[in-house]
Image (tube, rainbow, N blue to C red):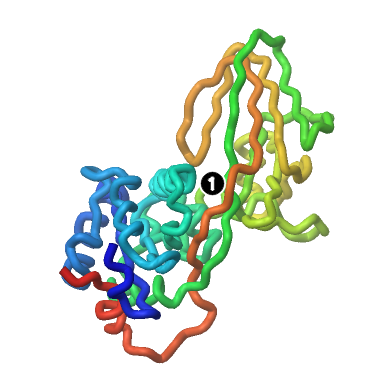
Amino acid sequence: QFSYLCPENWSPILVLANVRSGNNMAQDLMGEFQTLLNPIQVVDLDSTTPYKALQLCTLLPSHKTRVLVCGGDGTVGWVLDAIDDMKYKGQEQSIPYVAVLPLGTGNDLSNTLGWGAGYTGDITTEEILQSVLDGEVTKLDRDCLVQACKDLDQKIELELDGERIALPKLEGIIVLNIAYWGGGCRLWEGTGDKPYPPASHSDGLLEVVGVYGSFHCAQIHVKLANPVRLGQAYTVRLILKNSVMPMQVDGEPWVQGPCSVVITHKTQALMISPSKRQPEEDVQSASAQGTVES
């Protein structure tokens, strides 16, 4: 390690880019970041796994590294899974803080954290790096999903913290731990015309809502209707009794057979949200402050 050689207030930046995101925009951004940072700090996730890339953090001062993930929600989830692996392998002191440059299609996690619904090239790479350095650390709940398949009949059962919930006639059940869903819809909030328990991405609680169909979803998107708020819970259990049923997690779909799905709190990730303050510092300081010397 060479952390003892680093200045006390130094915060290095590691850029992890998914070149398959954003119509190859990540490929162009990688080249720009490499002109500002040491090339070792800019990693192509198409050729290097997040876990391997994050091992650079173990050589740097504890809890000082800031990681910028360039990609969609799926890419961010991939990086956060690698950070969980670091925790399990005793590298807790090397866990970085994570910021997002949204290059995916939905970008709901990025939107929740304040980084916006999609990067359009309206700010420079220097400004992006400065925003990462100035950003405020926030906690993000991470949940795990467990499936135990067995033969069941043709109904769905929902339990919230062990309590059975009576379901109206629905076409979909959605479990949330962030504010945005479906490409920018604040689903739990709905129209905002009725009081409802507040939602947070760092309180350990999951929000569970139902929808009557695709038209109902469209109404919620334009704030003409509210979702069916089924409740909040630390543990959600769904018993799927149909022979096959469509499901998705973080935008990744599949067809699921009869099973019991349990979603419960797993850990928390240390994320970065844009600073509420706008410092007057020269954005060029991002290059000097965020570069590892060869």
How would you rate the neighbour count of disc 1 (Cα within 10 Å): few for under 14, some for 14-19, many for 20 or more?
some
Residue at the location (80% across, 30% down)? 168
In percent of width and height, residue 149 lies at: 60, 15
198 or 118: nearer the eye? 198
- Residue 149 seen anywhere in this rendered image of the structure: yes
In percent of width and height, residue 74 lies at: 42, 44
Residue at the location (68% across, 37% down)? 211
In percent of width and height, residue 131 lies at: 40, 74
Q: Residue furthest bottom?
A: 280
In percent of width and height, residue 243 lies at: 60, 11
Q: Quarter of the image containing the C terminus?
A: bottom left
Residue at the location (71% across, 41% down)? 208
Name the quadrant containing residue 196.
Answer: bottom right
- Residue 74 seen anywhere in this rendered image of the structure: no
108 versus 124 height, above or below? above
* 59 left or right, relative to 224: left
- What SS does tag 1 mark? loop
Residue ID for mark 1? 182
Amino acid type at circle 1 is Gly
Q: Quarter of the image containing the N terminus?
A: bottom left
* 37 left or right, relative to 120: left
Count of marks overlaid on the render:
1
Residue at the location (25% across, 72% down)? 291
